[in-house]
Image (cartoon, rainbow, N blue to C red):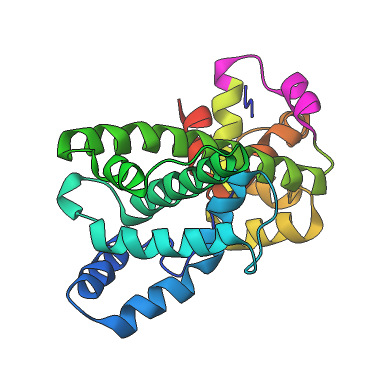
Amino acid sequence: MVSLRLKWATPENGQPSIMEDKVKLAQSGDELLRHELISGYQPFVKKVISKVCRRYINESMDEYSVGLLAFNEAIDQFQSNQGSKFLTFANMVIRRRVIDHIRREQRQNQHIVLPYEEDEDFAQEENYAEQRASIAHYEIELQREQRMDEIEDYQMLLQEFGITFSVLSKQCPKHIDARDNAKEIARLLATDSELSEYLMQKKRLPMRKLEELVSCSRKTIERNRKYIIAVALIYLKNFHALQSYIDS
C-alpha cells in the first residue's frame, strides 16, 4: 500500500553541481558571489535553525546570526572530495553551531563558564575520517526529515482531492496485477500534459479519455480511482522519497 517537506526551495534546487561550483569560486576569493550565496540562502538557514529550535526564527534573534555565520563557515570548510553536497554539509554545520550556541546560553544561565579555548578546541577536534562519518550519519537523518516533510505535503495535497490516508489504505488494490495496472494508469496521467492538467483542475480522473487509452474497463478504473489519483500525484509533484514506496 501507499503508506504514506517538498524539499526546501532553493535557487539551485535540482542543480547541485552549479551550487558546488559557486562555493568553490567563493572559496577562491569571489566575495560578491559569497554575499549572493549567503543572501540567497537565508530562507534555507532560517528553516534549519527553526528545526533545531522548534520555533519560528526571525532576523532579530541571536540564533539567526549564528546560523548565517555558520553558513559562511560552511562555505570556507566545504570539500567536494568528501562526497557530500554543499547544502547537506551546510545544514550540518548550521545545526552544530546553533546547538553549541544554545548549550553556551544554558551554561551561562546556570553560571557555569567554560574557557573560550575549550569551546574552540572542541569545534576543531574532528579529523577528516570523523567528519565523513558524521556527514554520512547526518545525511541519513536529513533523508528521514525530508521524507517526513514530503508526507506532510502529500497529505495536504490529497485533502484537495478528498482523499485521506485511512481511506487510501482501504482502497488500495489487493492483487498485485490490479495494483500494477493502477500504477500504469497513474504514470500515464502524470506524463500526459492534457490528462494531468484535467486532473489538477477538475480534481477528478478524465474517465472518457482514459477509457480510450487503456485496456481496463471504466468500472475497474472507477473502483481504483482514489489509488490512481494518489499515485499520479506522487509522480506529478516529484515526491522522490515516496516514489520508492510505489516503485518497489
Left or right for 190, reference 10: right
Magenta span: chief secondary structure: helix
- Classify 30 as above or below 89: below
Position of residue 97 measured from the top left corner of the image (x, y, whole percent): 43, 49
Position of residue 139 measured from the top left corner of the image (x, y, whole percent): 38, 38
Q: Nearer the viewer, residue 45 or 243?
A: 45
The answer to if 68 sits in the magenta stretch is no
**Residue at 30% in and 52% down:** 85
- Classify 22 as above or below 6: below
The reply to whether residue 152 is in sight is yes
Residues shaded magenta = 164-177
Instruction: Name the quadrant of the N terminus.
Output: top right
The answer to if 165 sits in the magenta stretch is yes
**Residue at 61% in and 14% down:** 175
Left or right for 198, reference 149: right
- Classify 218 as above or below 9: above
Q: Nearer the viewer, residue 176 or 32?
A: 32
Instruction: Name the quadrant of the C terminus.
Output: top left
